[in-house]
Amino acid sequence: MELQIITPEEVQSASAVLATTKNWVAAYQKKEAVLIAQADKEGIKLSVETDSAINDFLASLKKATKTANDARSPFTRRLDEIKGYFTAEENLLKGLETKLQEKRNASVKVYTQEKAEQARKDQLKLDQAKARIELFAEAEAQIRNQYAAILKQDKQGLLNVFEALTLDNIAEFEEFLKADVLPLTEKIWSSVNADLSNPLIYPLASTIVDELDEICFKAKEGKFEKVAPHYQAEIKNYADHLLSLIPERRAELEEGKASAAAEELRKEQEAAAQLQQQQSEQRQAEQIKTQVGAAVIDVQIEQAHRGLSIPKASAIESYGIEVLEQAGWSEIFKFYTTHCDKDITEKTTMNTMKLFAEAEAKRSGTIIESAYLHYEPKYKAVTRNTKKAA
């Protein structure tokens, strides 16, 4: 279809119509000013003559307005037709984007949902890695503390006997200290076990329930071969130290005195045990921090690699609320009254309240927790100018 351009004659005719209308406007404005002045002069109650004059003016004004409209209509209709030719083609251009935009939106939705699911998996992977690291360290600490308790108890037993010595049995105890130390038996070691089963104490255990027994086993595995010689060395050194105190203890007994060395030794043992515990906890914390940091870096690297295969189309997210049951509208009403600072008027519809709840979900992430409502996220792929259109 060819565009029918307005002819010069039509332009000239339209100009004449516009000029006539402008003259009418000037004349009617002048007459209006006179009538307003007369009405203001008379006040709220108009005279019969003035009211009649205003009536005649308004009737003439309506007639002039209709005449002006009728005179210009043929020209403005033609302009509307011309405008329609342009907008029709523009709408066709705009319509070309609909199907392709819908395909991009659907694609972005899938990628976004997959990203959220992958983020959940990544977080679970991190939680599980952290659980393995922290729970293994905890299991090792339990094994270590139980062994330390056995060693402390046996040393304390020797110290208690030393402190309770009499002149009658001191020689026998002296010979006992000179003898070989009894080893740490496997029967005693079998009582040493880690326990990670309490979910209140170890909440991370819920992420790797099937691995807890293995973690406890690994934490103890191979430890006996290390602690057995350590136990003998510690008890032997302790026995030798007590043996060196026998002459002093014999003299104290002969004088009827309590053992000064025993009390001092007890304090030294407590201080040494406390220091060892602090150092062990510090080493454990540093080890956990290093290993967890490495696990986090591994997941971040995986995320970066996945990002290379995702289209560079960011999503603008919004939410649509589906009301599943009638009670859902009550939930929306309560949400609106507690979150919106606008007053409810006769123009405030339930749809208005629903739109507010949808906008609030996008703005602040606040949603109505209700079994009667379903929030459906909506996605739109953003179009960016990357090169000139072909």
Image (spheres, rainbow, N blue to C red):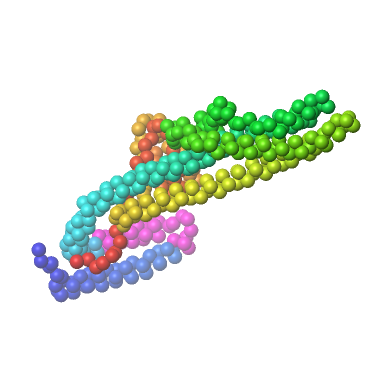
Quarter containing the C terminus: bottom left
Front-most of residues 156 and 116: 156
Q: Quadrant of residue 381?
A: bottom left
Quarter containing the N terminus: bottom left
Front-most of residues 75 and 52: 75
The residue sitting at 36% across, 45% down in the picture is 118
The residue sitting at 63% across, 39% down in the picture is 233
Asked if the stretch drawn in magenta spans residue 51, the answer is yes
Residue 302 located left or right of residue 338: left
Where does the image place residue 303, in percent across and percent down from the top left? 37, 51
Residue 96 located left or right of residue 357: left
Residue 314 located left or right of residue 198: left
Magenta highlight range: 39-66
Where does the image place residue 350, in percent across and percent down from the top left? 39, 39
Asked if the stretch drawn in magenta spans residue 243, the answer is no
For the image, the number of numbered tags is 0
Where does the image place residue 180, in percent across and percent down from the top left? 65, 32
Main SS of residues in magenta: helix
The answer, for residue 130, to whether it is visible in the render is: yes
Where does the image place residue 55, in percent across and percent down from the top left? 35, 57
Front-most of residues 128 and 22: 128
Q: As drawn, which residue projects farthest toward the top?
A: 168
Front-most of residues 373 and 353: 373
Residue 223 located left or right of residue 249: left
The residue sitting at 88% across, 30% down in the picture is 254
Residue 203 lies, with reference to residue 315, above or below; the image says above
The residue sitting at 43% across, 57% down in the picture is 47
The answer, for residue 330, to whether it is visible in the render is: no
Q: As drawn, which residue projects farthest toward the right?
A: 255
